[in-house]
Image (cartoon, rainbow, N blue to C red):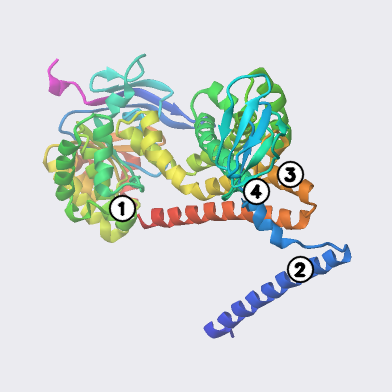
């Protein structure tokens, strides 16, 4: 099997039941191949974020299989921390570490998890901060940054671990409208550089422009998936047509 | 309408009212003491803090004294035979030529200042509080982490510890530690006191630590885990530093309580500030002055601790 054929992340028939019996995910299968940009859309509460947390084994699933880089995460003795280190994640609420500066936020995990030398990590971190346009904020604390700036630091923090794939959980939903653009711009540049990405989003224009594949979820199931042109212009699914028309 | 000047004046009047109330209480205490014909002897109090009586020089063994003509030294001949020893350095000899003394008897004094009983008690209180504080921190941190750990056994044990300690009086715990555990392990009074105070305070520190950890948003731990950190790394580098900083006022309050609670160790053979106060009272019959003085010394310790903590908090806030 050559490398491009092995999905970076694959879920097969995963199911997630919550304590109260409701089903967050229901027989969901999805694979993410190298170089793909997958956008997941759907009404709120449809299981998008739950699926994303299953993709890096942050939340355990109740049935089905999750494979990261060809390793089944449910097998006994699997080092989950090491698998997760290869999967970057960006959160809706940024979740920067408030007691550390922007630069320290970037440097913490590579030093503690990958045990890389501080000088090497520092150079890479400063490079990344420059890439997201925040070279001058390296020594600021998260509280001193705007929402858009915090989210860009969060993206740089995930990238500093040199992941193979990046997951985004509604990265612009908590932002003031005027800050959405700067974050999407960083994500666009990332996709243009060939980063494999899986993005849960409500930004249809972004999904249409950047995605290689768009997935529509409803009630814990993947209802429809297609490449952007047919997904947005000629969706062969009644519920998706309704969903899209509500958004226009 | 209340303008800014109006608010200022009201604040000022409030301060004056408070001062009048305090003075009133002080005056009524004074008149109450007149009622019981109490004789105030404030001039004696400094002597309990710093003694000018000098250092006692005692006989090293049983013997017969022969005073030297200079009045500052003497020779002691052992009763049971042996070498005659010369004792020097007296500023005042309190014994007569030819006296027979026994080992430990006072021969005389060397002038100079030495710590009085209250100062010695203050030092003991400070020492036992600080040593207990260190152990309480370690114990509380461990138990607090156990309270939120994923291990059910660790959670159970920590919960049991906290409930047992918080549900029983400190005085009873001190008795158990001193008479039971102290006897079994043959602990010194100091070690038993430190153990009792550390175990007691540790339970409260554990609850403060647990509360601090639980108040940190879940997203912090999630972000750390998503970066590949282990549960312990996430706790150690992300959650705990924030939790401890947020709960530092509560921790400071607990340590001030520790200093005050340490007065209970005076029931063991430990001469802390409270025990020293009791000893001075029983030998001088000046309870009012001595207890006021003891309270003031406790206030000095707790006040300076909270001052240090406030300064540290301000420094952290600036960061």
Segment tinted magenta in the rendering: A1-10
Q: In the rendered view, tell whether residue A154 sits above or below residue A143.
A: above
The reply, left or right, for residue A55 in relation to residue A229 is right
| Spatial separation of the CA atoms under disc 4 and disc 2 | 27 Å
Residue B25: assigned label:
2
The verdict on a common chain for dots 1 and 3 is no
Q: Mark 1 points at which residue?
A: A141
Contact, CB < 8 Å: mark 1 with mark 4? no
Chain of the residue on which disc 4 is drawn: B
Q: In the image, what residue occupies the spot 68% across and 26% down?
A: B62
Residue B94 in view, yes or no: yes
Parent chain of label 3: B
Label 3 crowd bin: few (<14), some (14–19), many (20+), radius 10 Å: some
Answer yes or no: is residue B169 visible: no
Residue hosting label 3? B279
**Callout 4: helix, strand or loop?**
helix
The disc, 4 or 2, on the residue closer to the chain's N-terminal end is 2
Q: For the residues marked 1 and 3, what is the alpha-carbon distance in whole angstroms?
A: 56 Å
Disc sitting over residue B118 in the figure: 4
The reply to whether discs 1 and 3 touch (Cβ–Cβ < 8 Å) is: no
Q: Marks 4 and 2: CB-CB under 8 Å?
A: no
Element at label 1: loop
> Which is more toward the observer, A224 or B176?
B176
- In the image, residue A2 lies in the stretch drawn in magenta: yes
Badge 1: few (under 14), some or many (20 or more) residues near its Cα, within 10 Å?
Answer: many
Label number found at residue B274: none
Q: Which chain carries label 2?
A: B
Disc 1 from disc 4: Cα separation? 49 Å
Between label 1 and label 3, give the one nearer the viewer.
Answer: 3
């Amino acid at each position: 099997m050559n490398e491009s054929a092995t999905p970076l992340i694959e879920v097969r028939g995963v199911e997630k039941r919550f304590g109260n019996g409701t089903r967050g995910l229901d027989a969901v299968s999805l694979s993410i191949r190298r170089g793909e940009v997958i956008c997941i859309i759907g009404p709120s509460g449809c299981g998008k974020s739950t699926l994303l947390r299953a993709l890096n084994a942050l939340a355990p699933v109740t049935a089905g299989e999750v494979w990261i880089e060809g390793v089944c995460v449910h097998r006994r003795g699997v080092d989950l921390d090491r698998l997760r280190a290869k999967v970057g994640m960006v959160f809706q609420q940024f979740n920067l570490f408030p007691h550390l500066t922007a630069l320290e936020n970037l440097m913490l995990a590579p030093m503690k998890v990958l045990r890389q030398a501080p000088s090497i990590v520092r150079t890479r971190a400063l490079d990344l901060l420059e890439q997201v346009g925040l070279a001058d904020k390296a020594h600021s604390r998260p509280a001193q940054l705007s929402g858009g700036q915090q989210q860009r630091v969060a993206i740089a923090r995930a990238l500093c671990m040199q992941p193979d794939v990046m997951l985004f959980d509604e990265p612009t939903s908590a932002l003031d409208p005027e800050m959405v653009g700067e974050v999407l711009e960083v994500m666009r540049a990332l996709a243009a550089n060939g980063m494999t990405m899986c993005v849960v989003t409500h930004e249809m224009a972004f999904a249409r422009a950047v995605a290689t594949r768009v997935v529509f979820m409803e009630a814990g199931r993947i209802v429809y998936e297609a490449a952007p042109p047919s997904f947005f212009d000629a969706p062969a699914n009644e519920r998706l047509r309704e969903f899209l028309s509500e958004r226009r | 309408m209340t303008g800014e000047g109006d608010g200022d004046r009201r604040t000022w009047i409030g301060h004056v009212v408070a001062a009048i109330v305090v003075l009133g209480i002080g005056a009524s205490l004074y008149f109450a003491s007149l009622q019981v014909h109490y004789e105030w002897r404030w001039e004696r109090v400094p002597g309990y803090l710093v003694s000018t009586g000098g250092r006692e020089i005692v006989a090293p063994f049983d013997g017969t004294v022969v005073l030297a003509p200079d009045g500052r030294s003497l020779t002691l001949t052992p009763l049971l035979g042996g070498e005659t020893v010369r004792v020097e350095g007296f500023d005042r000899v309190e014994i007569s030529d030819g006296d027979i003394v026994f080992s430990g008897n006072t021969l005389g004094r060397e002038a100079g200042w030495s710590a009085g009983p209250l100062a010695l008690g203050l030092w003991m209180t400070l020492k036992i509080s600080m040593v207990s504080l260190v152990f309480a921190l370690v114990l509380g941190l461990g138990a607090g982490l156990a309270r939120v750990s994923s291990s059910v056994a660790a959670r159970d044990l920590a919960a049991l510890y906290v409930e047992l300690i918080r549900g029983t009086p400190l005085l009873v715990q001190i008795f158990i530690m001193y008479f039971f555990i102290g006897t079994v392990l043959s602990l010194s009074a100091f070690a038993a006191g430190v153990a009792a105070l550390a175990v007691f305070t540790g339970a409260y520190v554990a609850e403060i630590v647990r509360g601090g950890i639980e108040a940190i948003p879940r997203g912090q731990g999630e972000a750390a885990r998503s970066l590949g950190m282990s549960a312990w790394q996430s706790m150690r580098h992300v959650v705990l530093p924030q939790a401890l900083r947020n709960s530092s006022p509560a921790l400071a309050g607990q340590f001030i309580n520790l200093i005050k609670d340490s007065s209970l160790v005076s029931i063991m053979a430990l001469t802390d500030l409270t025990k020293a106060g009791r000893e001075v009272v029983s030998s001088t019959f000046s309870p009012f002055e001595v207890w006021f003085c003891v309270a003031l010394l406790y206030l000095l310790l707790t006040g300076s601790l909270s001052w240090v903590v406030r300064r540290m908090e301000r420094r952290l806030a600036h960061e």
